[in-house]
Image (spheres, grey):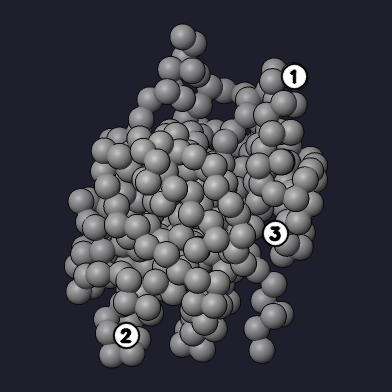
Amino acid sequence: MSPSTARAARTPTATDVRAAAERIAPYARRTPVMRTEVDGRPLTLKLEYLQRTGAFKLRGALNALLGGEPADRVITASGGNHGLGVATAASLLGIRATVYVPETIPEAKAAPLAATGAEIVRVGEQYADAADAARTRAETEGVRYLHAYDDPLVVAGQGTIGLEIAADAPECDTVAVAVGGGGLVAGVRLGAGGRRVVAVEPEGCQSLHAALAAGRPVAGPVDSIAASALGAAILGRVPFEVLSAHPVTPALVSDEEITRAQDRLWEEFRIATEPAAAVPFAAWLAGRVPGENPCLVVCGANADWRRVS
């Protein structure tokens, strides 16, 4: 087994998250937490949408490129945010990046991605189509393929959010996170210091619920307004192994609840999020996030702000 294969096969730990925090500190922002009250209930928001690139994905990309075997080129696939994270991280580190995206990528994500100077290739209608094409090219050309969420270094990098919450908001007893392929929730579970983690999915994109029901990652439908960020058809193997050893509390929200949560975030805080980032808030508004002092991760804001009026 090669070093890269051995690394890919290893399940990340809390120690890996702490190492990731030190590794990415010179490049990633330590995003703030905001303590507030909504509808008479205390609430803390982790403002990760203030991260460079407008989303949390930069953390995992930086950790993977800094912690992996040295390379001058990387290929990835993304619904938008991961690609922007990889392209930005690659630019910071002097690495060439090629990003495959679905043809349906929102322009609010496509435009900043193109501005990084990375090679952009549009393929198919869903993330899975772009990922298949990207992996094929990476194998053909002998270039490293960086998975959006099924990579231990990526998971550990995303976990630095949980580490920051534990340090900056120690009174929080619950952390709620949106779930797509599972990289963020698995990382936060490792980094949050034993706090309860609520894993929230749209009703139309239930990769975690499907994996828990089947006892393994299985493919499922992708149909939600949050699909551009949470549209993984199957949970990653690495996140599944983390969450099998460190269980989380699953929850579901409807598209209508997500839209209302987006509107409330704007009305209450003037935060214009993409649908995926409103998913934890939607679950909290619906009473599906337990805890006396919950923290919700507002994970990204790469949406067209002009839709907000």
User: Mark 2, residues whose alpha carbon is within 10 Å: few (<14), some, or many (≥20)?
Assistant: few
What residue sits 67% from the left and 38% below the top? Answer: 131
The answer to whether the residue labelled 3 contacts the one labelled 2, judged by CB atoms less than 8 Å apart, is no
Q: Which residue is mark 2?
A: 37
Q: CA distance from mark 3 to mark 2?
A: 31 Å
Q: Is residue 31 above or below residue 267?
A: above
Q: Secondary structure at mark 3?
A: helix
Please give the label number shown on residue 140.
1
User: Mark 3, residues whose alpha carbon is within 10 Å: few (<14), some, or many (≥20)?
Assistant: many
Q: Secondary structure at mark 2?
A: strand
Amino acid type at mark 3: Lys
Sooner in the amino-acid sequence: mark 2 or mark 1 = 2
x and y percent of residue 217 in the render?
45, 38
Please give the label number shown on residue 61.
none
Q: CA distance from mark 3 to mark 1?
A: 28 Å
What residue sits 32% from the left and 77% below the top? Answer: 287
Q: Which residue is mark 3?
A: 109
